[in-house]
Image (cartoon, rainbow, N blue to C red):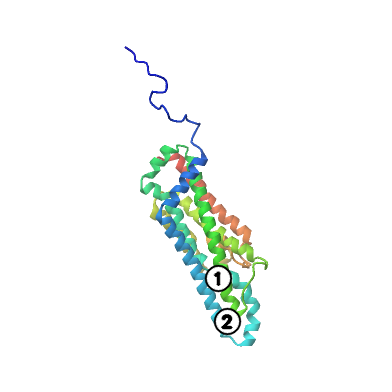
């Protein structure tokens, strides 16, 4: 004999009604909770700030000490040139800081695979494009904010040291504010390039190795090219293209600051697009 279940007493009674498909807002909240609940995030960001700021301060201190030991007439002859390089010297730590943010960018996505969380994440948010977009947006925001803070702190501390010898720059001078803001943008795009490689490779060691090879090793290797080759190749190297935005004065053979940075963003976009295509086609 069939049993009639009273209204409001069946399975699922008392639960809120489903409201459409899982959306971007919930995915953003979920990914923000993930990234701030992982201890490695904090350690990586702290390492980024310490390395970038610390190297900038050390180079500025060395520059000021060297300048103070020059004869007065030499100081007067070189002062204008030193001031033109002051911004770039204080941001020198970005050369190694990019490697730290690259490691974090790779870990942000490859840790999903190494821990098996990717299957849980996709069961909660089966729309792969939305899930990946939310994860990328949250990481990009964290990288950008951290990069801007680190860049400005490096600049102000470095200029405070250089001002003891009156060879410091000011934010109001042409190209200086662009360079300091560009330092933060540069770090954010470095992280996104590594993030994209992480999606493509799905392996932490592989993604980190590929990122370091593109951002640092390739830059070092091009230094051994003959000058006739280097004049044509150097500007296409990812680090050289991206760093143009935080260098106060671009070399004649390099792209202009915004052109170089646009090329650098293009490299990151290629990695992210390739990762998205593969992510949609492959099994978790």
> Percent x, y for residue 80?
65, 77
Asked if residue 278 is positioned above or below residue 103 in the image, the reply reads above
Asked if residue 79 is positioned above or below residue 44 in the image, the reply reads below
> Disc 2 or 1, which lies upstream in sequence?
2
> Percent x, y for residue 81?
63, 76
Query: Is disc 1 surrounded by few (<14), some (14 to 19) or many (20+) residues within 10 Å?
Result: some
Asked if residue 8 is positioned above or below residue 173 in the image, the reply reads above
Closer-to-camera residue (156/110): 156
Closer-to-camera residue (227/128): 128
Q: Quadrant of the N terminus?
A: top left
Element type at marker 1?
A: helix
| Quadrant in the rendering for residue 66 | bottom right
The circle drawn on residue 157 is 1
Element type at marker 2?
A: helix
The circle drawn on residue 67 is 2
Q: CA distance from mark 2 to mark 1?
A: 18 Å
The circle drawn on residue 173 is none
At 36% from the left edge and 47% from the top edge, which residue is drawn? Answer: 115
At 45% from the left edge and 43% from the top edge, which residue is drawn? Answer: 279
Residue 110 visible, this angle = yes
> Percent x, y for residue 127?
47, 37
Closer-to-camera residue (58/30): 30
Q: Quadrant of the C terminus?
A: top left
| Quadrant in the rendering for residue 3 | top left
């Amino acid at each position: 004999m069939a049993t009639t279940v009273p209204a409001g007493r069946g399975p699922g009674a008392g639960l809120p009604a489903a409201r459409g498909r899982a959306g971007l807002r919930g995915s953003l909240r979920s990914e923000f909770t993930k990234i701030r609940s992982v201890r490695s995030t904090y350690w990586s960001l702290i390492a980024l700030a310490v390395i970038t700021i610390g190297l900038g301060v050390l180079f500025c201190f060395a520059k000021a000490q060297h300048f103070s030991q020059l004869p007065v007439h030499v100081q007067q002859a070189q002062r204008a040139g030193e001031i033109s390089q002051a911004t770039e010297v204080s941001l020198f730590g970005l050369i190694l800081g990019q490697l730290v943010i690259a490691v974090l960018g790779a870990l942000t996505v490859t840790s999903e695979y190494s821990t098996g969380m990717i299957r849980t994440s996709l069961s909660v948010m089966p729309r792969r494009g939305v899930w990946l977009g939310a994860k990328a947006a949250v990481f990009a925001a964290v990288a950008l904010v951290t990069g801007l803070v680190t860049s400005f702190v490096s600049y102000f501390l470095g200029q405070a040291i250089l001002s003891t010898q009156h060879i410091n720059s000011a934010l109001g001078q042409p190209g200086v504010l662009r360079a300091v803001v560009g330092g933060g943008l540069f770090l954010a795009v470095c992280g996104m390039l590594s993030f994209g490689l992480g999606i493509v490779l799905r392996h932490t060691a592989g993604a980190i190795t590929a990122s370091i090879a593109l951002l640092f090793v390739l830059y070092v290797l091009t230094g051994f090219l003959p000058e006739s080759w280097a004049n044509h190749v150097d500007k296409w190297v990812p680090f050289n293209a991206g760093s143009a935005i935080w260098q106060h004065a671009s070399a004649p053979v390099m792209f202009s600051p915004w052109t170089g940075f646009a090329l650098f963003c293009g490299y990151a976009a290629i990695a992210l697009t390739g990762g998205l295509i593969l992510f949609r086609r492959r099994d978790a």
